[in-house]
């Protein structure tokens, strides 16, 4: 029984849902039911005069592949036992349950953190049970393939995802409606942009291979393609403008939805589900008589149910309840041959004195509830999605600190998380006023704001944060000269680094996260003396004098920026004795002190560092005016530890990062984690 | 909740002792994922396929257990991996053994979840003034990491590992040590909640504890260990039942 996970086999709700399904295919013969006479048709009207459009029930060759084995076995059994078509029908019903179960597994994969509730909201969904087993809709297969495509995309397998969507289209052409949304999603997100060709080519190739030959040989396929599955309904709803002019409402709505998706831009998967759910719901509300769209909505409705509270769940159940009542009233009930019950025809059922009025009232309520559901889905999708808050404008991170504290190392490490092309940067060094040989350096240190064009620095940084490109010269550390100005384009992440990155209030206000890098004073002296005396040959006295000269400017202009930082990293010597010996040339083990202005989440960070990374962590809570801080000894921490810890600490940010982020080892990796945590913590506050 | 012997669990205990693995969280699923991660790493870094690795690992584990008997070290993954690498003909390789051990534990932890309502039960028992202790086999380092990861370290007044006691729970000493840490005497009534046969037998023998067996689910197919006074599969159910006894007591 490896096909069914152990936990499902022991889940009574799963077993109950399975029994309900088995009972349904045994007892009920829906008005629209599996048809064994045509390979391409799944739904067959009980009688031809009930207004069901036969085009709704036409499917492509993938459905043929599903039907063939079940039809063959059922037909063989029927002919051997003389049971008419009963066993064929039952066999096809089993096929449907298998597809249904596969969709459950795919949805559990898509919503992995809520596997348990997926069983409740999907497997026991009255909407699914009613549409598939009572009403006899077989769109489950293309829905399964579309959901599987989303799952493969999520698992970074774009070509397989494209091929899967191609299969969905080759099952039912209406799956094409999803394709433009997925292309917009992939293109808008730099993380996925390079996957667009692979995804699109695989999708197109599968469609061509599977549908091409059938187009030539099968009349029904040509009919389906010509009608576009259920897409032919899109032209049913029109607005008369007079003088014989009409507007097609649904194509307009669809294009507006696509524009909306394009306008949203970079989306997380949850936001994509919201957008797709909204699109299907709008199409559904505009064509409420169409059966197929309801099932297409199910995976996205599930996403909403899993994230919405009780009121959201109640709303979806209310929506489903009204839909079921409406269909019970206006659509034919299935036959129950084992009990000798004939199908109840479509139309008045005698349940109400004026069923047409009741049906109208239910339809109105259905549309109203659908509208409310749509609004709440959108509100929740956009309003509660941290990613959307973060993704609307570039993520600006400021990194300030004295020379030699590791600003560039941290900037590179953060850049590696977001990926090449997703990061742009502006460095304070490029805004020094004088070249290295400039005489005014005798009057100023680099730390003095007067020696830097801080106005231009702030203006350019703010331009990048506002998606505008800048022209900027570059200070070449090798020559001490400036290069000619070059174009710097805006991108998803803007790293603002420099001695004075947190100096200007206007710039600080636009930074998502402000980082200050500090270093234990003894350690700073040790590194500088070791380098300048032993490597550059300066005298100790001269080096110490230089340190003292800079120190006053550091205290006056650099250190005060600490107060504006969300996070202050300080490098400390793990062994203070070691750095008293300026002749020590070996490695110097370091510890990292992290001070957070907003201490929420600090305890969780410390716990994960201890538990997952095996790091040694001392936690000091905020006391009076002193900020909360942790001191981490984590030189042995590996990039894989950092990666898994990030998945636990800030799962919502995963989609902001590159597909293969460059996690760092040791203290730099821990800094990556802290900055990400601050980004996540500070995002809702500043939205 | 199934009561098998009402008498020992009728009154409020002086303390409650918990096991950790498969009692407060499910071990099997995260363990499988952790071993998958280790196999993948071994395949990638040592070019050893999962089949030969599994074979060597099983042999290594059996050897370590045979050699160390019922001690905390006999459960030490680092020793299992060290011996596995040796059996694969690659000499000791401490760096690789450490890496595999860390891969195993971090993957296990990231996939482990406390059972539903387990934490709420601990909170409620603490709020009722009951001292709680954790008595568990394995080394302190990893069991402490688990407690910290789950954030449940704050609920226990005493934690005893078999590493600290020098012998596994089956040797009784960890239970006596827990009682001493809680400042209780041998005649004080205590409850023990665990999943394994050996734990139940040992806690009865060492402390004459009232014993509760945590089963993975409500299926009647789970074997009830000899001497168990009650079984439960859901902590919510256990907590609700505790309310009646503890409030009445």
Image: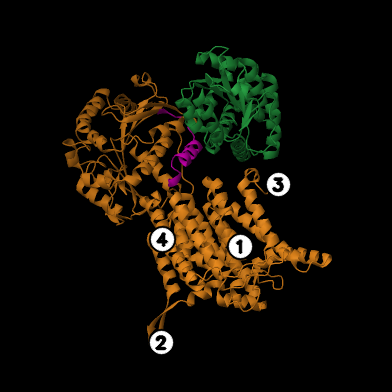
Residue named by callout 4: A372
Mark 1 and mark 4 in contact (Cβ < 8 Å)? no
Mark 1 and mark 2 in contact (Cβ < 8 Å)? no
Q: Is residue A479 left or right of residue A107?
A: left
Q: Earlier in the sequence, mark 2 or mark 4?
A: 2
Q: Earlier in the sequence, mark 1 or mark 3?
A: 3
Front: mark 2 or 4: 4
Mark 3 and mark 1 in contact (Cβ < 8 Å)? no
The local crowd at label 4, few if under 14, some if 14 to 19, many if 20 or more residues have their Cα within 10 Å, is: some
Instruction: Measure the alpha-carbon separation of dots 4 and 1.
Output: 25 Å
The local crowd at label 1, few if under 14, some if 14 to 19, many if 20 or more residues have their Cα within 10 Å, is: many
Q: Earlier in the sequence, mark 2 or mark 3?
A: 3
Residue named by callout 1: A132
Q: Secondary structure at mark 3?
A: loop
Instruction: Measure the alpha-carbon separation of dots 4 and 3.
Output: 43 Å
Q: Residue at x 63, y 54 (%)?
A: A101
* Callouts 2 and 1 on one subunit: yes
Q: Earlier in the sequence, mark 2 or mark 1?
A: 1
Q: Quadrant of residue A249?
A: bottom left
Residue named by callout 2: A244
Q: Is residue A36 above or below residue A677?
A: below
Chain ID of residue with mark 3: A
């Amino acid at each position: 029984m490896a096909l069914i996970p152990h936990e499902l086999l022991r889940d009574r709700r799963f077993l109950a849902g399975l029994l309900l399904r088995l009972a349904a295919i045994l007892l009920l013969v829906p008005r629209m039911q599996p048809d064994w006479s045509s390979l391409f048709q799944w739904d067959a009207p009980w009688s031809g005069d009930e207004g069901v459009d036969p085009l709704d029930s036409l499917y492509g060759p993938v459905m043929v592949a599903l039907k063939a084995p079940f039809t063959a076995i059922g037909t063989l059994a029927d002919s051997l036992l003389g049971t008419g078509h009963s066993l064929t029908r039952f066999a096809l019903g089993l096929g449907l349950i298998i597809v249904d179960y596969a969709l459950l597994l795919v949805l559990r994969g898509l919503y992995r953190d809520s596997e348990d509730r997926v069983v409740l909201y999907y497997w026991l969904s009255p909407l699914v049970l009613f549409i598939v087993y009572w009403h006899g809709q077989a769109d489950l297969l293309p829905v399964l393939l579309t959901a599987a495509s989303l799952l493969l995309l999520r698992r970074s397998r774009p070509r397989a995802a494209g091929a899967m969507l191609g299969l969905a289209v080759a099952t039912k052409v209406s799956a094409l409606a999803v394709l433009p949304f997925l292309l917009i999603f992939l293109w808008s997100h730099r993380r996925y942009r390079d996957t667009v060709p692979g995804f699109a080519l695989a999708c197109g190739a599968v469609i061509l291979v599977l549908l091409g030959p059938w187009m030539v040989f099968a009349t029904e396929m040509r009919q389906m393609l010509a009608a576009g599955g259920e897409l032919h309904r899109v032209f049913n709803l029109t607005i008369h403008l007079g003088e014989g002019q009409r507007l097609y409402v649904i194509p307009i709505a669809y294009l507006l939805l696509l524009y909306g998706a394009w306008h949203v831009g970079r989306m997380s998967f949850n936001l994509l589900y919201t957008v797709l759910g909204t699109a299907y719901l709008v199409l559904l509300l505009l064509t409420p008589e169409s059966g197929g769209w309801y099932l297409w909505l199910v995976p996205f409705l599930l996403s909403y149910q899993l994230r919405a509270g009780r009121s959201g769940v109640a709303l979806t159940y209310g929506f489903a309840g009204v839909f079921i009542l409406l269909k019970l009233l206006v659509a034919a009930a299935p036959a129950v041959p084992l009990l000798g019950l004939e199908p109840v025809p479509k139309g008045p059922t005698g349940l109400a004195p004026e069923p047409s009025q009741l049906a109208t009232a239910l339809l109105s309520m259905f549309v109203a509830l659908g509208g409310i559901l749509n609004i709440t889905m959108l509100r929740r999708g956009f309003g509660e999605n941290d990613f959307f808050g973060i993704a609307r404008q570039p993520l600006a991170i400021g990194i300030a600190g004295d020379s030699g504290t590791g600003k560039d190392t941290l900037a590179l490490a953060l850049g590696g998380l977001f990926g090449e092309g997703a990061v742009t940067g502006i460095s304070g060094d490029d805004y020094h006023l004088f070249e290295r040989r400039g005489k005014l350096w005798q009057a100023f240190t680099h730390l003095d704001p007067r020696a830097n064009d801080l106005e231009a620095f702030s203006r350019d940084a703010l331009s990048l944060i506002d998606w505008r490109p800048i022209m900027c010269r570059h200070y070449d550390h090798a020559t001490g000269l400036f290069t000619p100005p070059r174009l710097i384009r805006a991108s998803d992440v803007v790293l603002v680094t420099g001695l004075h990155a947190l100096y200007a209030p206007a710039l600080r206000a636009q930074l998502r996260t402000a980082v200050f890098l500090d270093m234990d004073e003894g350690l700073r002296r040790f590194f500088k003396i070791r380098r300048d005396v032993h490597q550059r040959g300066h005298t100790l006295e001269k080096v110490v004098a230089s340190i003292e000269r800079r120190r006053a400017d550091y205290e006056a202009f650099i250190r005060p920026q600490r107060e504006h930082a969300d996070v202050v990293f300080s490098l400390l010597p793990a062994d203070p004795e070691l750095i008293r010996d300026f002749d020590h040339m070996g490695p110097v083990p370091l510890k990292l002190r992290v001070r957070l202005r907003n201490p929420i989440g600090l305890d969780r960070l410390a716990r994960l560092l201890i538990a997952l990374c095996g790091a040694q962590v001392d936690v000091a809570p905020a006391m009076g005016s002193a900020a909360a801080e942790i001191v981490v000894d984590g030189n042995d921490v590996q990039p894989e530890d950092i990666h898994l810890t990030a998945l636990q600490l800030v799962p919502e940010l995963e989609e902001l990062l590159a597909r293969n982020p460059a996690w760092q080892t040791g203290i730099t990796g821990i800094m990556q984690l802290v900055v990400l945590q601050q980004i996540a913590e500070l995002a809702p506050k500043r939205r | 909740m199934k009561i098998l012997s009402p008498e020992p669990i009728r009154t409020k205990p002086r303390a409650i002792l918990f096991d950790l693995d498969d009692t407060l969280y499910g071990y099997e699923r995260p363990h499988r994922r952790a071993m998958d991660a280790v196999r993948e790493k071994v395949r990638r870094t040592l070019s050893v396929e999962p089949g030969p690795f599994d074979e060597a690992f099983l042999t290594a584990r059996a050897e370590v257990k045979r050699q160390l008997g019922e001690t905390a070290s006999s459960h030490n993954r680092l020793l299992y991996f060290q011996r596995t690498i040796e059996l694969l003909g690659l000499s000791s390789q401490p760096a690789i053994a450490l890496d595999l051990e860390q891969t195993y534990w971090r993957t296990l932890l990231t996939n482990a979840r406390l059972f539903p309502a387990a934490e709420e039960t601990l909170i409620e028992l603490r709020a009722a003034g009951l001292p709680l202790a954790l008595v568990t086999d394995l080394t302190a380092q990893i069991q402490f990491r688990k407690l910290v990861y789950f954030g449940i370290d704050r609920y226990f007044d005493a934690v005893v590992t078999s590493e600290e006691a020098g012998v596994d729970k089956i040797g009784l000493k960890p239970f006596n040590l827990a009682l001493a840490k809680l400042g209780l005497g041998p005649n004080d009534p205590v409850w023990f909640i665990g999943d394994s046969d050996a734990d139940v037998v040992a806690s009865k023998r060492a402390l004459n504890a009232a014993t509760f067996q945590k089963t993975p689910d409500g299926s009647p197919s789970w074997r009830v260990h000899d001497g168990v006074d009650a079984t439960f599969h859901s902590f919510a159910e256990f907590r609700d039942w505790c309310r009646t006894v503890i409030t009445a007591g």
